[in-house]
Amino acid sequence: MNIGDASTQSGLPAKTIRYYEDIGLVSPGRGQNGYRRFSDSDLHKLAFVQRARSLGFSIEECRALLSLYDDRERVSADVKALARSHLAQIEEKISGLQAMQKTLSELVDKCHGDERPDCPILDGLAGVKVTIKVTGDVE
Amino acid sequence: MNIGDASTQSGLPAKTIRYYEDIGLVSPGRGQNGYRRFSDSDLHKLAFVQRARSLGFSIEECRALLSLYDDRERVSADVKALARSHLAQIEEKISGLQAMQKTLSELVDKCHGDERPDCPILDGLAGVKVTIKVTGDVE
DNA sequence: TCTTGACCTTCCACACACTGGAAGGCCTAT
DNA sequence: ATAGGCCTTCCAGTGTGTGGAAGGTCAAGA
C-alpha cells in the first residue's frame, strides 16, 4: 500500500505520515521504486497515533503509548498513569481557558460596542481598574 | 529605564521584550551606550501586551489591539468585535478539550490499572470497539 | 510509442512565540 | 585593577506539522 492509500485509511495527510517516519514513529518498508510500502501493522500504528493525537497526546506521549501497545509484558498501570497525567494537563488547560473566558466575557459585556472610542476592554488591558458607575449624589 | 527594570515592571522576560521589539510591537529608544531606554509609554505598551497575551490574544491580535489603543479615532465596536472573535476561539478550544476530557476519562475509568497487560485505553486508541460485558448465557 | 496526469520522492523554508546559549561590550563598586 | 552584573547581537532550537519546488514513476489513453 502506497502513502496515498495509507493517508486515506488513517485519516492523516501524506505529509504528516512522512514526518512521522522522519521522527521514527513508523518505519514503512520501501518498494523497488523507492516508494514507501505500508503494511497492515504500519497502518494500525498510524491510526493509533491519529486517535491518540486527536485526544491531545503529544508526539512523545504517542511514542510511549505505541511502545506500550507493542509490549506484551506491559502493565496496564503504566498506561493508566500516562493517560491520567495527560488528563490532568487537559484539565489544567481547560481551567486556564475558562479563566480567560470569564475575564474576557466580562470585559466584552461591559463594552457598548458602538461608534465611540470609549472602551472598557482596552481599559482593562491597559490596567485601568474598572469601577462601578454609581448614579446619584456623592458627598 | 533599562530592559531589566522594564522586565520587572511589565512582568515580561527581557528576552521576550527584545523579541517584541524585533517584531515591531514596541520601539524603545537607545542610550549612547546602545542600551534600550524604555519610556513610560513603552512600559504601558509592554504591560498592555502582557495582559492581552495572558488572555490568550495572539501577537497579531495584540498588534491590532495596540493600534486601536493608540488610535483616538477608534470605534469601540472594532475592539468588541476583535474580543468577541477571540472569545469564540477560546470557547471552541474549551469544547474541544472537554470532548477529549470526556473520552479520555471514560477510558481511564475502564482501565483497572494493575500489573496485567490488558488495557481498555490502548484498545480504545487501537480502534477496538469497547463492548459492554454481559454476564449470563448467550444463545 | 508517446503523452498526460496522478502519484511518488527529497529537500528547504515557514508557521508561532518564544527560549537558551555563546561571545563580547559596558558600568559600578571595591 | 578586577569582579560581577548588566547589556548587546546572533544563531539555533522548541513542537508539529504545512507549503512548495524540482524531479522520478506509473498506468491509461491516443
Image (cartoon, coloured by chain):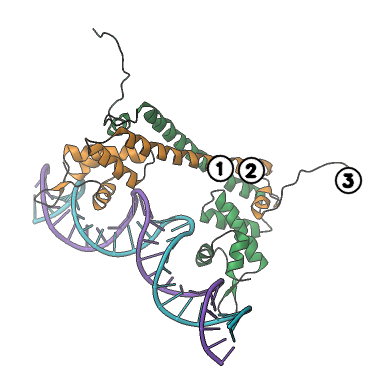
Chain colours: A green, B orange, C purple, D cyan
- Nearest to the eye among marks 3 and 1: give it: 3
Left or right: residue D8 versus residue A78 is: left
Q: Position of residue A12 (x, y in %)?
A: 56, 60
Looking at the image, which residue is at 56% across and 51% down? A54
Q: Position of residue A31 (x, y in %)?
A: 60, 78
- Residue at horizontal 29 percent and vertical 25 percent from the top: A129
Residue type indicated by callout 3: Val
> Is B128 positioned to the left or the right of D15 in the image?
right
Q: CA distance from mark 3 to mark 1?
A: 37 Å
What chain does mark 1 sit on?
A
- The answer to whether residue B100 is above or below residue A44 is above
Residue A120 % position (x, y):
31, 29
Place residue A14 in its image quadrant: bottom right
In this rendering, do the residues under marks 3 and 1 share a single chain? no
Which subunit holds the residue at mark 3? B
Asked if the residue under mark 1 is in contact with the one under mark 2, i.e. CB atoms within 8 Å, the reply is: yes
In the rendered image, which residue does mark 3 sit on? B138
In the displayed structure, does residue B33 sit left or right of residue C16?
Answer: left
Q: Which residue is mark 1?
A: A87
| Residue type (three-letter) at the residue carrying disc 1 | Leu
Q: Could you say where residue B78 lies in the image, as x and y percent from the top left?
A: 33, 37
Disc marking residue B108: 2
